[in-house]
Image (cartoon, rainbow, N blue to C red):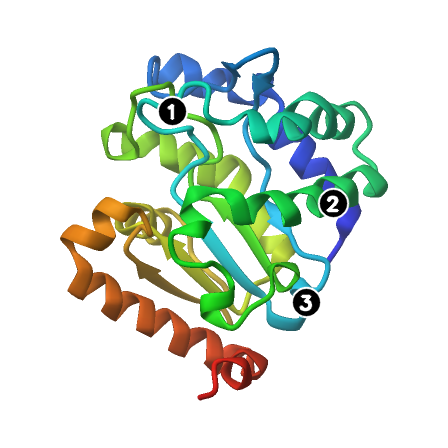
């Protein structure tokens, strides 16, 4: 895995100028920048744990948008957007890429999507052993939910950024959190023969409550798949 290549790609993903075509084609559905309390949220380039090569398990969310009604709730991410991402974009060197990932390793467990299922411990993984990104790598404006976004915008994100990121990461297994995101990934991207893709319901409390039975089936299937490619997870889960 080439960290310099990933650093260059991360800088390109997070650069709002990389999304100019998307903002022209899908106005109102993509927000390369979102102003918060004294800082600007940028597209997130993804996370690669320092021990990712042990598992080669990638998790993909739908997108890094702050969610409907979430204005002002992301001050805990201020160092990411005020310091670490601008630093990487100015000089996309490996040291800045490593600093970004070290910060994300401590920040991501506080995100709702992780806390709702005690991620990644529930899968027998440590945060340093996985990679995490999104199928749509750009923010959506406040109040715009992923199911309201045109499929073409997801295709743009996959073609221009995610496919390259996955090629460098070379995962054994991709677990997609969100059924629509999984459907669009499989529609617009062809994995290597050695890469498996499975999907599970988005670990949002509403989904977990209203579709609990199907969510629990998906959750168990994801555990089985992870244990298959990473036997250490199987031992940790006592299977």
Left or right, residue 110 beside residue 10: left
Q: Position of residue 42 (x, y in %)?
A: 57, 23
**Between residues 191 and 145, which one lies in front from this camera angle?**
145
> Looking at the image, which residue is at 41% across and 19% down?
71
Residue 137 % position (x, y): 48, 35
The residue carrying pointer 1 sits among few (fewer than 14), some (14 to 19) or many (20 or more) residues within 10 Å by Cα, namely few
Distance Cα–Cα, label 1 vs label 3: 34 Å
What residue sits 45% from the left and 26% below the top? Answer: 139
Give the residue displayed 43% in from the left and 32% down from the top.
156
- Identify the secondary structure beneath mark 3: helix
The disc, 3 or 2, on the residue closer to the chain's N-terminal end is: 2
Of labels 1 and 3, the one closer to you: 1
Question: Badge 2 is on which residue?
Answer: 5
- The answer to whether residue 75 is visible is yes
Among the 4 quarters of the image, the one containing residue 52: bottom right
Counting residues from the start of the chain, the first of labels 2 and 1 encountered is 2
Q: Which mark is residue 116?
A: none
Q: Quick check: 17 above or below 186?
A: above
**Considering the numbered disc 2 on the image, is that residue within a helix, a strand or a loop?**
helix
Q: Which mark is residue 53?
A: 3
Could you give the CA–CA distance between mark 2 and mark 1, rounded to whole angstroms?
33 Å
Q: Residues within 10 Å of mark 2 (few under 14, many from 20)?
A: some
Which quarter of the rendering shows the C terminus?
A: bottom left
Where is mark 1, residue-wise? 70
Marks 3, 2: nearer the viewer:
3
């Amino acid at each position: 895995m080439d960290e310099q290549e990933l650093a260059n790609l991360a800088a390109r993903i997070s650069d709002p100028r990389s999304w100019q075509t998307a903002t022209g084609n899908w106005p109102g559905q993509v927000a390369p920048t979102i102003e918060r309390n004294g800082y600007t949220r940028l597209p997130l380039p993804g996370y690669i744990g320092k021990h990712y090569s042990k598992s080669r398990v990638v998790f993909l969310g739908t997108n890094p948008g702050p969610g409907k009604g979430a204005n002002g709730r992301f001050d805990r991410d201020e160092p990411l957007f005020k310091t670490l991402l601008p630093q990487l974009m100015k000089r996309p060197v490996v040291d800045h890429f490593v600093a970004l990932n070290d910060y994300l390793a401590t920040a991501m467990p506080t995100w709702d999507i992780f806390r709702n299922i005690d991620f990644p411990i529930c899968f027998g993984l440590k945060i340093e052993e996985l990679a995490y990104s999104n199928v749509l790598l750009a923010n959506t404006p406040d109040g715009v939910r992923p199911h309201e976004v045109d499929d073409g915008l997801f295709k743009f994100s996959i073609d221009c950024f995610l496919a390259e990121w996955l090629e460098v990461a070379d995962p054994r297994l991709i677990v997609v959190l969100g059924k629509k995101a999984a459907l669009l990934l499989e529609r617009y991207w062809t994995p290597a023969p050695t890469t498996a893709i499975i999907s599970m319901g988005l670990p949002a409390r509403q989904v977990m409550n209203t579709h609990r039975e199907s969510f629990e089936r998906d959750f168990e299937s994801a555990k089985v798949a992870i244990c298959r490619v990473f036997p250490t997870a199987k031992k940790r889960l006592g299977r």
